[in-house]
Image (spheres, rainbow, N blue to C red):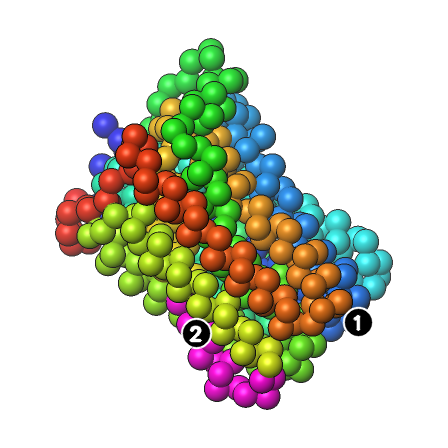
Amino acid sequence: MNNSLHCSKFYQFLIIFGLGFLSGLPASMYGTTLQAWFTQSGSSLLLISSLSLLNVPFLLRFIWGPVVDQYFNASLGRRKTWLILIQLILLVCIEVMAWSHPSNPETFLLSMGFLLAFFSSIQDLVIDAHRIEFLPKDLFGFGAVVAIYAYRIALLVSGGVALIMAQEFGFAKTYAVLGLFYVLGIFLVFKSPEPKCIRLNDEYDNGPYLDFLKQKNLLIVIGLVIFTKFGEVFVSNTSPMIIPFMMRGLGLSLSYIAYVNKIFGLAAQLLGSAIAAFFVWRFSLLTLLMLFGMLEVVSNGLFILVSMHTQHMPLLWFTVGFENLATGLCSTVLVAYLMNLVNPKYTATQFSLWIMIAIVPKLIAGPIGAYLSTHFGWTFMFVCSTALTICFVFFWWRLKRRESLELPREIKPKMMSFSES
């Protein structure tokens, strides 16, 4: 019997929430907050946009799946061993960054940002596997919502709140404070139960990859995932291009960006995740991907208008709210969809493979966006992002027509009270 059945549902989701928060905390610190730090220091747009390449470790994190699944301290458990180790390393990385500066020297802070992203990718791999093994399958949808909620709140803290703190106290002190969250994280991991995992056999080295490649209509599903993610990588509050656009394209201050893009934008994402939680219990995930994917297309189109009317702040607020609402809806459904594609025998490796595929658009968005915006302007960049996003419809249509594909069915968990055990 899974260990998660021995604790109340409230305790289950409290753990999922805490780990989701720890997973999301570093994302802005090597992402948009770091981009703002470099932008403020006067770095070039090419360098700033190239920070999106710090997502490369997430692209390759599947390599570490077999290591994480097979090697661990027996007294701590397969997931807790890695969680404790990685959080100690992340704490050190963040505190070292707090003593750095983009120009003293520039390469050192970039190197520390890479290390932060690298170990954060391994932490995410372990946390994703922990969530899938910790929850019964009928709670995957709700678990995805809780994890995404926590992830978004962490982005709010390390993104919006961090920018406000940075304007008042500087980026160095801000990073020093944010790193202390991992002291609490280590305590949480020690107190949480270790989920029971399926025992691995000697064929594990090739098993997860061969099993992954045997999935029906794999290339179509990959295309659907990639082009669905294109809907957010140029325009959401975690986009590598949105901070440079707001600072240089719109001329906004750090604090204004924090309020409109981070705080307001993340609030809209949280609302989107909450609405998605209602729908994933009642409708096909594939149907929801079409509906919410089209909202992403519309949101990219709205940014075309914003780039043409740079002084129209009500339009900016509406667009940011609409886009992040769509991102919250679409990303929540996509995570629930991918969780159902994973073989429980190879949780960490296979889920990391899907995340690798989902990361590809974000990885290339920075260099592509920098080139397009520099040579053709911000409006043309958003026209291209809208065109890329709408391509997901083709893959959705192909997937829908394949009657032989064993699609994950609707997630319809029973309605529950947190007081149940």
Residue 170 magenta: no
Q: Position of residue 359 (x, y in %)?
A: 55, 47
In terms of depth relative to the viewer, which is nearer, 397 or 409?
397
Q: Rate crowding at label 2 as few (under 14), some (14 to 19) or many (20 or more) other CA atoms within 10 Å.
A: many
Q: Is residue 168 visible?
A: no
Point out the image quarter for the C terminus.
top left
Element assignment for label 2: helix
In terms of depth relative to the viewer, which is nearer, 162 or 49?
49
Amino acid type at circle 1 is Gly
Amino acid type at circle 2 is Gly
Q: Rate crowding at label 1 as few (under 14), some (14 to 19) or many (20 or more) other CA atoms within 10 Å.
A: few
Residue under the point 44% across and 63% down: 296
The magenta-colored residue range is 309-326
Residue under the point 68% across and 57% down: 368
Q: Position of residue 327 (x, y in %)?
A: 43, 61
Count of numbered circles in the view: 2
Q: Circle 1 is placed at which residue position? A: 42
Element assignment for label 1: loop
Residue under the point 33% across and 58% down: 291
Q: Circle 2 is placed at which residue position? A: 321
Above or below, comparing residue 248 to residue 9 in the picture: below
* Circle nearer the viewer, 1 or 2: 2
Point out the image quarter for the N terminus.
top left
